[in-house]
Image: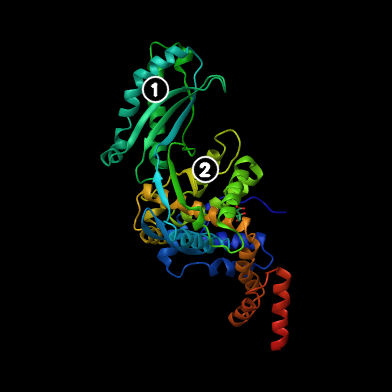
Amino acid sequence: MKKPVDGFSRLSKEEKIEWLASHYFQDRKDAVSIIKQYWNTDAGLQKLHDEFIENTITNYYLPFGVAPNFSINGHLYSIPMCLEESSVVAAASKAAKYWLKRGGFKAEVLSTEKIGQVHFMYNGDKQKLIRFFNEIKPSLIATTDGITKNMRKRGGGILNIVLKDKTDKLSNYYQLHATFDTLDAMGANFINSCLEQFAKTFKEGAARNEDFTEEEKDIQIVMSILSNYVPNCLVRAEVSCNVEELNEDKNISPVDFAEKFVRAIDIAKAEPHRAVTHNKGVMNGIDAVVLATGNDFRAVEAGIHAYASKDGSYSSLTHATVENGIFKFWIEIPLALGTVGGLTSLHPLVKLALEMLSKPSARELMQIVAVAGLAQNFAAVRSLITTGIQKGHMKMHLMNILNQLGATENEKKQVADIFKDKTVTHSDVIKEFNNLRTKTL
Ligand code: MEV
């Protein structure tokens, strides 16, 4: 029977590992050796990673890949991507090359407004609350002067604060709904600091407000927090070409391809089960770049999926049309990203990824990330409506299977040759691998 541990965070790294090894692993030595195998030999670099989170015992690697040949608004990018799923980077690269020959990707930022809210309970006369809010609003902004000074100098800051009556959803529930421009910062700390100050000023002001009864003075602040739903921080990316240019695949005519493609998108618009998988493909591209550039992929995921439901039913993030002989395919998504602050100046690989992208502003990164999502979706839908995805997937997965089998480089090459023109299945790979081993015995 395992017992809870007290003071785990105060143990040294070695002690934590020792405790874990002795409590959770049959082969303690093996567990410790795996954990330590991933330590960086550069003590300074290891310390940097240790301190990103609490209770770090080791590092968890993800491959850092690159998808080259992305033409975005006329600039050529090699896009860094971090993820574990085989075939995603290959698919992105393929889509990049495909559209390179057809005018490239066009992207534009539609808006950059971030949101934060102070959620509070007020039991009293609504008109008095409105009067009080209008009186105190200048102080809400003034008392954050110290926090917003630098951001204001650079042209950002608080855009507005409005009082929202949410009592139709929950009795006595109101919000201070604030909007911000955080420029190149994702802005979570900035927004949350402003909100906590708003809450303090608001509560203290209410307690002094002579217009309020004693009960009305007692405003209950429940929480102050940014919203990861940013429907006014939007980016759009697009590709288009004449339908006749969609002529890569010999087995399907350009017109049929275009029509089938639009139909596939329409299905994802109409049907939530398909929409979720369709958007998962979009997120393959988005998350990988968000992660490589040190941004918060959970925030991005939450916000984008909420946006996919904005019309009342979960739907496709991408859209496609064929009109007057022109095929058009586009994405519109909310993205709150940063290229300064957070991990961007701390993690050496994040710095490298941003330099690879020519040190983009947050607006440029929004465009690059949206393009990665669109490209990934194009590649997935293109495969799905033509060859099916398993052909490409299993080709990439072949190496994973061979690695699991402990194949040598030479064996990998030989088995890959066998499957060059053959469908890859797990059992066939094992069979061919075993044949090869028996032959060489
Ligand atoms: C797999 O990671 C993603 C796809 O399922 C996306 C899709 O179905 O559109 C291929």
The label number, if any, that marks residue 204 in the structure image: 1
Q: Is mark 1 within 8 Å of ligand 1?
A: no
Q: Residue at x 60, y 67 (%)?
A: 396
Q: Which residue carries the number 2 mark?
A: 304
The N terminus lies in quadrant: bottom right
User: Which secondary structure lies at badge 1?
Assistant: helix
Q: Amino acid at mark 2?
A: Ile
Q: Is residue 147 visible from the viewing direction of this image?
A: no
Q: Position of residue 16 (x, y in %)?
A: 56, 59
Front residue of 138/267: it is: 267
Residue positioned 71% across, 78% down in the render = 432
Q: Residue at x 63, y 40 (%)?
A: 270
Q: Earlier in the sequence, mark 1 or mark 2?
A: 1
Q: Check the image and report above or below for 80 versus 306.
A: below
Q: Position of residue 392 (x, y in %)?
A: 61, 64
The span from disc 1 to disc 2 (Cα, nearest Å) is: 36 Å
